[in-house]
Amino acid sequence: MTNWKIDPAHSEINFNVKHLLVSTVRGHFEKFDATIKSDKEDFSDAKIEFEADVNSINTKNEQRDAHLKSADFFDAENHPKMTFKSASVKKISDHEFEVNGDLTLRGVTKEITLNVIYNGTVDGMGGSEVAGFEVKGKLNRFDYGLQWNGLTEAGGVVVSNEVKIEIFAEFSKVKEASIAA
């Protein structure tokens, strides 16, 4: 079994959601961790685990970030972590996969499907192997108890229920000596 660990300096965990249904608000998580375990070089048998610190959410607006951390949305005080654990990986082509797994937000676990592009594996700095991935998916925030939804003066929705996920991830192969330590 080969182990891979995400390189946070070369990875991004992003999301975007429609605001007033006409513009898009983007955000990301600054603190996260992920691992991949795989016997096959093409990652077609990968076991993936991921977690993000909800308190590290950043939308470039402190007031909005505080609201997202509150009980109206993520309830970070009671649910500080967002997690994902893969259940299956389906190879679509040499570089495309469909990954199904359980996403837990706010204490609610639901199955989600993520579309993954495998950008390949290369020799990285210091001689370690590096693999790159691009991940896209979407979820309905209401399914996870993120129910808040203000209305405009005209009765329109402030925040869409659909959240798009976009991840750019670089993983480094973990050397065997590091695992035993």
Image: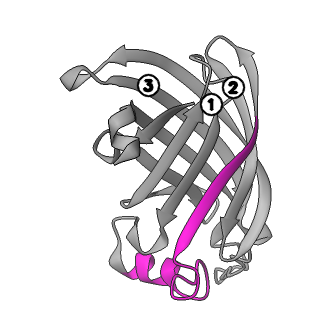
Q: Which mark sits nearer the N-terminus, 1 or 2?
A: 2
Dot in front, 2 or 3: 3
Neighbour tally class for label 1: few under 14, some 14-19, many 20 plus, Cα within 10 Å:
many
Q: Is residue 30 left or right of residue 45?
A: left
Q: Secondary structure at mark 2?
A: strand
Viewport quadrant of the N terminus: top right
Tell me the residue at 68%/23% (across/down): 44
Give the residues in magenta.
63-88
From where the camera sits, is residue 174 visible? no
**Which of the pair 7/63 is nearer the observer?**
7
Q: Residue at x 66, y 43 (%)?
A: 137
In the image, what residue type sits under mark 2? Answer: Phe
Task: Report the residue at 70% width, 72% height from top.
Answer: 157
User: Which amino acid, by three-letter code, is at mark 1?
Assistant: Val
Q: Secondary structure at mark 1?
A: strand
User: Of helix, strand and loop, which one carries label 3?
Assistant: strand
- Residue 97 is labelled as 2
| Distance (Cα) linking label 2 and label 3 | 14 Å
Cα distance between the residues tagged 3 and 1 = 13 Å
Q: Are marks 1 and 2 in contact (CB under 8 Å)?
A: yes
127 or 25, which lies in front?
Answer: 127
Counting from the top left corner in percent of width and height, residue 101 is at: 74, 48
Residue on which disc 1 sits: 116
